[in-house]
Image (tube, grey):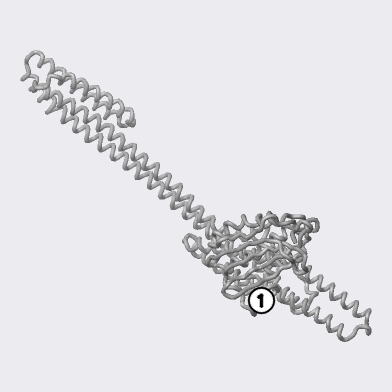
Amino acid sequence: MTFQRRLLLGFALMTVPVLLVGAEAMRSNALERRALEALGQGLGRGRTYAEVETAMFNQSEVLWRALSGLEPGARREYALQGEVVRYWFERWRGELRPDERQLGENVRILHREIEQVGDSVFRLIDAGRREAGYNLARRELRYRLLPALTEVNHEIYRRAREYSVQRAFARVEEVVNAERRALLAILVLAAVLGPAAAWLIARGLARPIRELREAMAVVGAGDLDHPITARGGDEIGDLARSFAQMTGRLREARAEQLRLNGELGERLTQLERAQAQVVQSEKLASVGQMAAAVAHGLRNPLASLRASAQLALRHPDSPAAREQLHAMVEEVDRLDHRIGHLLAFSRPAPVRPLREPAGPLVEGLLPPLAHLLAERRVTLARAIAPGLPEILVDPVRVEQAVTEVVANALDAMPQGGTLTVGARVEPGADGAPCVAITIGDTGPGIPPEALPSVFEPFFTTRAEGTGLGLAIARRFTEQNGGRLTLASRPGEGTTVRFEFPVAPAAVGAVPA
């Protein structure tokens, strides 16, 4: 498992309880919504019966208007209201539970008796006995049937409210109890996963980095025979193997130098021996410098990761814990970037030159930068001449070199600015035509005293830098037969210039 994947696995274990809490909240919300829907259905049944009740009372009112003799269409309206009562009654009865069927039967009996009284009243009216019809309606409707209907209505509404509310309350109580049990299980899981993730991160980071740092310190002190153990196949293991290879080459070089010294013996002058010692010292100093840079570059981010992990363990459900997790992911990406720089600088890579048109090659480097430029509020200015000739380069190495320079330019403009990318044909340092690619920024520039050291490995003016960006860019440029120079003025910005010779077959096409 790689270094980055091991870290991400540890952080993923820490986020599992947060995800489970979110899932439980969504599940509880769905159950509560269903409980409310059931309550709404119970109340809706009460609204249906309200239509039945209203229609029955309206039918009774029509009967009284018919007794007054002032409304000739009352009989027709009475029959129509009876149809309305039957319509709503059938809908309401279809919604009743089995234990409520008797209430429905009572309502049906009352409505049938009301219609029987109405039919009797209309027969008395037709016989000219309006006063007898009035007495019958008052006695049967007002004093017997309507009070009975009111009493049945009270019972129906009471049962509907009790059933709907009690059922909804019981459902909500069940949801709350289930949610309590789920949250308790999540807390137990968090108590287990948190230490496990911390142990995984500590095991995957602390021990191999400590061993590598100790080995670098010993080798930097001059002991090239010290064993360097590469654990695992992740990025730290790759770095340890690269360092072991470098130490092996230094050891072989020292052995070869000693053999040559033994063969030459007295023929070597004191000056030659002094030069050999200077070369050996420079090599050892380079190893020691690399060890110090790696230790310094990794120690502070690891301390920040440890502090963030401890905070997340103490408060796993707080918003601050999630912020710390994001901060840890950013620190991991920064560590990965530093290690990638070290590997790119320490590993020899073969160069595969191809004939590439200079114009499309430079234009092809710009689209991937669009998102990063917009994020940094940096404006891109193009100054690419048309019809540029072909150059013989490895496009991957050229892209990497340009990317390192652009990254430095963006870091120099944290508040935004203008990035200028240009390309044109110019005479090179030897007078032969070359394609000059320039990258300029509007940052604060580089102090004059720092300019002689900008291409040295591990030299940087930024606390977060690795000091390898320009060194890598210069190596890749020179491997492709090119030349890299830099010009800067404090307060005006910095311009980096790549010079690549024109491909031999294209020399004759370049205008004088």
Q: Please state if 274 lies on the left or on the right of 185 as rendered.
A: right
Expressed as whole percent of the image width and height from the top left, the position of residue 379 reads 55, 61
Q: Is residue 366 left or right of residue 119?
A: right
| Residue at the (19%, 33%) spot, across then down | 151
- Residue drawn at x 70%, y 63% is 436
- Determine the residue located farthest toward the top in the rendered image: 127
362 left or right of 311? right
Instruction: Name the residue nearer the viewer: 340 or 314.
Output: 340
| Residue 115: x %, y % from top left | 19, 21
The answer to which quarter of the image holds residue 325 is: bottom right
* Relative image position of residue 480 (x, y in whole percent): 76, 62
Say which quadrant the C terminus sits in.
Answer: bottom right
Residue at 72% x, 54% y: name it: 357
Question: From this viewpoint, which residue is outermost toward the bottom?
Answer: 270
Circle 1: element type: helix
Location of mark 1 (residue): 451
Q: Is residue 97 visible?
A: yes
Q: Where, by quadrant of the figure, is residue 52 drawn? A: top left
